[in-house]
Amino acid sequence: MTVAEIPAFATQQAHDVRFEWGWHGAAGLARGSGVVVIVDVLSYSTCLDIACAQGATVYPFRFRDDSVQAFAQDRAATVAVRRGEEGYSLSPHSLQAIPAGTRLVLPSPNGATLTLEANAPVVLAGCLRNAQAVARLARTLPGPVTVVAAGERWPDNTLRPSLEDLLGAGALLHHMAGDKSVEAQAAAAFFAASRTNLKRLMTGCASGIELAERGFANDVALASAYNVSACVPRFDGQAYCAGP
């Protein structure tokens, strides 16, 4: 299915605030939206919150292939290393002390890829850490607003809807005013019912277990923090930096 084939009944076009998953959410529902918010809690949007709050500029890139070095060189930027290697990576923990002014290319098959597919006037990155701040800014901008949960991937590369991104999207929608689609209402209601158990849910979900088993429990803890950041990463068509 291509973006052009998305049927009208699936676009939530009657509503000001919308919620969808994955590539079709970013590429399809972005059309006609004034604001798209990409939610990839473990870990792209959490990394963006931490890095941009420190004054870094982050360039999304789809894949870590042979073209990424040339892309970074053209922008006088550093390419993130693989998670677990020494340096800045998709591990939020690795970005806590990133210096202001750093230009970082951060490849990701989920959050970065969806960013580059979201053809909307304004693209923001949201997570649990900055949910209220992102929702507050989104409310001041011309809508509609579409919140897109990135999800993860099964081994066959199909979308695996993930609990952490449902929580992150729900947190944003919980703080967002406007006429919500029933999909957006359901995500917000799920978060409202879960907000007192965020740490348990984040550590117990599939993605949280995976990262802990790989030695990245600190990343899960950072991503589980709720409304601790006022940073709003905003994509300018090239890179994310802290928005107004």
Image (cartoon, helix red, strand yellow):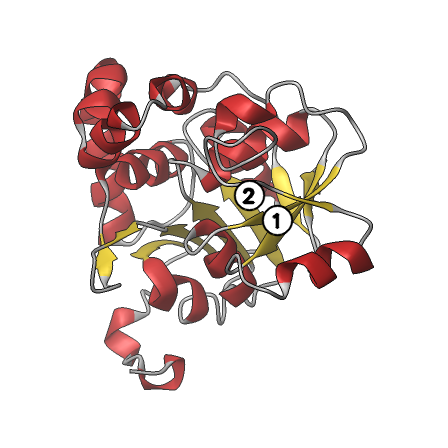
2 or 146, nearer to the observer? 2
Q: Which residue is mark 2?
A: 138
Q: Is residue 176 above or below residue 23?
A: above
Q: Amino acid at mark 2?
A: Ala
Image coordinates for residue 82, horizontal then vertical, percent? 50, 41
Q: Is residue 24 visible?
A: yes
Q: Residue at x 40, y 67 (%)?
A: 29
Can you tell which mark lies on residue 155?
Answer: none
Categorize mark 1 by other alpha carbons within 10 Å: few (<14), some (14-19), many (20+).
few
In the structure shown, which secondary structural element does the residue marked by tag 2 occupy?
Answer: helix
Q: Residue at x 46, y 36 (%)?
A: 83
129 or 173, nearer to the observer? 129
Judge from the rendering whether residue 79 lies leftward or rightward of residue 208; answer left or right: right
Q: Label 1 vs label 2: CA separation?
A: 5 Å
Can you tell which mark lies on residue 141?
Answer: 1
156 or 3, nearer to the observer? 156
Image coordinates for residue 27, horizontal then vertical, percent? 44, 69
How many marks can you see? 2
Judge from the rendering whether residue 75 lies leftward or rightward of residue 13; answer left or right: right
Q: Residue at x 57, y 28 (%)?
A: 86
Q: Is residue 135 above or below residue 96?
A: below
Q: Residue at x 59, y 26 (%)?
A: 95
Give the quarter of the image for residue 109: bottom left
Categorize mark 2 by other alpha carbons within 10 Å: few (<14), some (14-19), many (20+).
many
Quadrant housing the N terminus: bottom left
Asked whether disc 1 touches disc 2, contact meaning CB atoms under 8 Å apart, the reply is: yes
213 or 95, nearer to the observer? 213
